[in-house]
Amino acid sequence: MSERKTYSIGELARELDITTRTIRFYEDMGLLSPRRRGQTRIYSPADRVRLKLILRGKRLGFSLAESRELIELYRPDRDNNQIQLQALLDKIQEKRDQLLRQLHDIEVMQIELDEAEQRCRDAMRTAADATTGPDTTTGQ
């Protein structure tokens, strides 16, 4: 007789190196729905997989809404989950495009900072030259 493994909130938190508060937050956001035995939360293997997917999405920079959308597309009865996989590919491309735009913005900002720094240094040199006046020892 094979009994399905279940997990406590503490077990999941330790395994995934997150806090129980984080897990409860994902529950509050409707991303996880463990069974309850009294006040005790009972997580299924499917809950564990969902939590791992949420954390992976977070590492990839996906919002919770994006992670929810991708997770909800999963249908274990479908072969290959083509719809979910295509949605994930689309999200990955969106994230890459966003990162490229941010990288460009950072490069432009670095150029602007370099120019502002040079103007400040030039102004400081000009101000220092104006306060010291001509060098009387050389006659200039």
Image: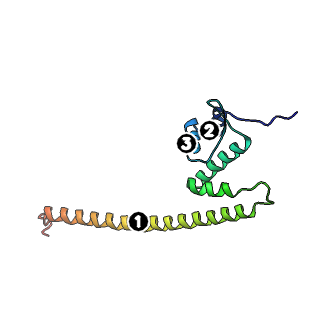
Query: What residue type is disc 1 on?
Result: Met
Q: Secondary structure at mark 1?
A: helix
* Residue at screen point 63% across, 32% down: 10
Q: Which residue matches tag 3?
A: 25
Which of the 4 image quadrants contains residue 121? bottom left
Lower position in the chain sequence, tag 2 or tag 1 = 2
Q: Is residue 47 left or right of residue 136?
A: right
Q: Quadrant of the C terminus?
A: bottom left
Q: Which residue matches tag 1?
A: 109
* Residue at screen point 77% across, 36% down: 5
Q: Position of residue 58 (x, y in %)?
A: 58, 51
* Structural crowding at the residue carrying mark 3, measured as other residues with C-alpha within 10 Å and reported as few (<14), some (14–19) or many (≥20): few
Distance between the alpha carbons at the discs numbered 2 and 3: 15 Å
Q: Position of residue 6 (x, y in %)?
A: 73, 35
Which of the 4 image quadrants contains residue 109? bottom left
Which residue lies most toward the right here? 1
Q: Nearer the viewer, residue 51 or 40?
A: 40
